[in-house]
Amino acid sequence: MILASLLFAFLAAALHVYIFTMESLTWTRPATWKRFGLASQADAETTRPLAYNQGFYNLFLAIGAFIGVGCVALAAAGSAQSVVGWTLILSCCGSMLLAAVVLALSGKKYLRAAATQGATPLLAVVLALLAVAF
């Protein structure tokens, strides 16, 4: 279960780096803003500062999850480094999961995006809890 949790945490982090790229680097490209349901280039320009900021939130969560995966993977079980790693995984992936819940509660049109955003952190958190508990 440890390996599976680490894998899903890594995948969640990688997805959030991709989301960062779209929100903070390519937001005003038509392929990106259309993916997020914006109606026009003008809307993309108007929302650009908000998306830019949100993208960095996603990046910071991803970095925390990556560091957590590295700490657990390189640490002896039960060591302080392992505890730090699990703490980072649970807090970063838990935040990703909660953000997906908020997105899902924002409206039916966001359910697919929320499921995509929340599936890997959900699996990472559940498997991490099982791995730590048993």
Image (cartoon, helix red, strand yellow):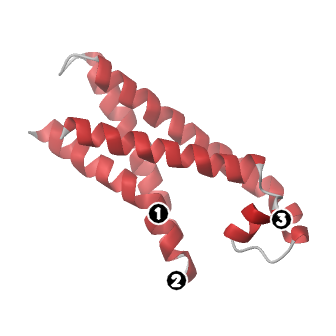
Residue visible at 33% across and 40% down in the picture: 7
The reply, left or right, for residue 96 in relation to residue 121 is right
> Which mark is drawn over residue 108?
2
Q: Which residue is mark 1?
A: 116
Establish if 36 lies above or below 19. Answer: below
Task: Say whether disc 2 or disc 3 marks the residue closer to the N-terminus.
Answer: 3
Please give the residue where the numbered disc 3 appears in the rendered image: 44
Which three-letter amino acid code belongs to the residue tagged 1?
Thr
Of the image marks 1 and 3, the number of the one nearer the N terminus: 3
In space, the residues marked 2 and 3 are separated at their CA atoms by: 22 Å
Which residue is found at the position 38% from the left and 59% from the top?
Answer: 119
Residue 85 in percent (x, y) is at 34, 28
Task: Name the residue at the front extreme.
Answer: 31
Viewer-nearest residue: 11 or 122 = 11
Q: Is residue 102 above or below residue 89?
A: below
Q: Amino acid at mark 2?
A: Lys
| SS for callout 3 | helix
